[in-house]
Amino acid sequence: MASRIARKITKAVLSREQMDGDGARVYRSIGSHALRNLDPFLMLDEFDVRAPGGFPDHPHRGFETVTYMLDGEFLHEDFKGHKGRIGPGDLQWMSAAKGIVHAEIPANNSRAHGLQLWINLSSADKLSEPNYQEYPKEQVLHVSPEEGIDIKVIAGESYGVQSPVMTRTPTMFIDVKLKKGKTMEQVIPKNYAGFIYTVAGTALFGGDQHKSEAHHTLVLSENGGTYIPVESTSDDCHFVVIAGQPIKEPIVQHGPFVMNTQQEIYQAFADYQHGRNGFEGAPEWTSSIRDRWSS
Ligand code: FJE
Ligand code: FE
């Protein structure tokens, strides 16, 4: 019988809340000082935003943003007129690539709570055409291998269910809810780097090795292992498993621009400022939703 190697947890970091955007509360996982970046991931924020907070007009270049809403609703609008609403369980997979300028703000007065993941793009993809993949809750595939185990397959595969999301950077992203005492194993391609982010409840991750509560990032070992075992120790256990193929290229990041060289960062600023090379129309544009909460 072939031997199976389990991933272990090499590092556990608790996120403290901080403010970003315009008065928006986030728990930063990847992208915080303790977890600078975990190639191919640049950032994971658990946002918990109430109007008038939000993320008004801002640009992106060189990577993808994945917004997965847990509770409440966001409005979004971009500089090409693409707009919509992201509600509980909805998924927006946005490949900003050569340039998107947009606003993301709460749709109403209740709390907008969710996850936003930033995935780097390889040099070959950084200046490709922007692209959206949008899935309302009903179209996000889910699998329940047994009662008390509920998995949403946002990207990649879990228990034989394959997400239709196209990932320019090979990525898996699953959302898991477990009742107390339930066990599951998530398969992870052996060359992927990955982590778990805990949203609620407690569980043992990586054998009996690690117990965790909410707002923790658990970095997975890069030991060639092909799965991570989990056992829930509470009825409200909720976490995500995110893993991807490392890009292994230099990263120069300036806020919302992520390129390979300093020169490309200067170019991104100039393009954004002058409305060129994918940022056409950006200097004149303001979103119609940005003033929703100002009187
Ligand atoms: C930001 C550039 C940005 N975390 N979580 C600079 F793009 C952002 C930003 C976000 C963001 C947006 C959502 Cl919807 C959720 C997020 C950062 O838009 F805050 C800064 N400072
Ligand atoms: Fe954004």
Image (spheres, rainbow, N blue to C red):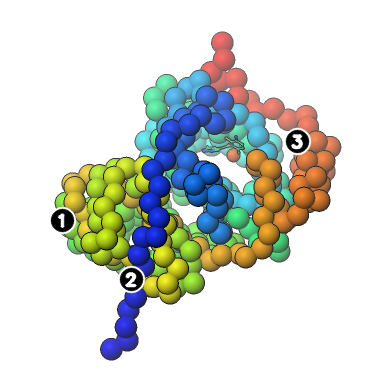
Using the rendered image of the protein, determine whether residue 184 is visible from the camera's viewpoint: no
Residue at (56% x, 10% y) in the render? 295
Q: Residue at x 60, y 24 (%)?
A: 290
Mark 3 or mark 1, which has the lower sequence index? 1
Give residue 57's position: percent from left, percent from top: 64, 31
- Residue at 36% x, 67% y is 7
The residue where tag 1 is placed is: 181
Quote the CA–CA distance across marks 2 and 3.
47 Å
Q: Left or right: where does residue 192 sit relative to residue 122? A: left
Quarter of the picture containing the N terminus is bottom left
Mark 3 falls on what kind of element? loop
Q: Which residue is mark 3?
A: 282
Badge 3 amino acid: Ala
Q: Position of residue 24 (x, y in %)?
A: 50, 28
| Residue hosting label 2 | 6
> Are dots 3 and 1 in contact, CB under 8 Å?
no
Examine the rendered structure and indicate whether residue 114 appears above or below residue 262.
above
Mark 1 packing: few (<14 Cα in 10 Å), some, or many (20+)?
few
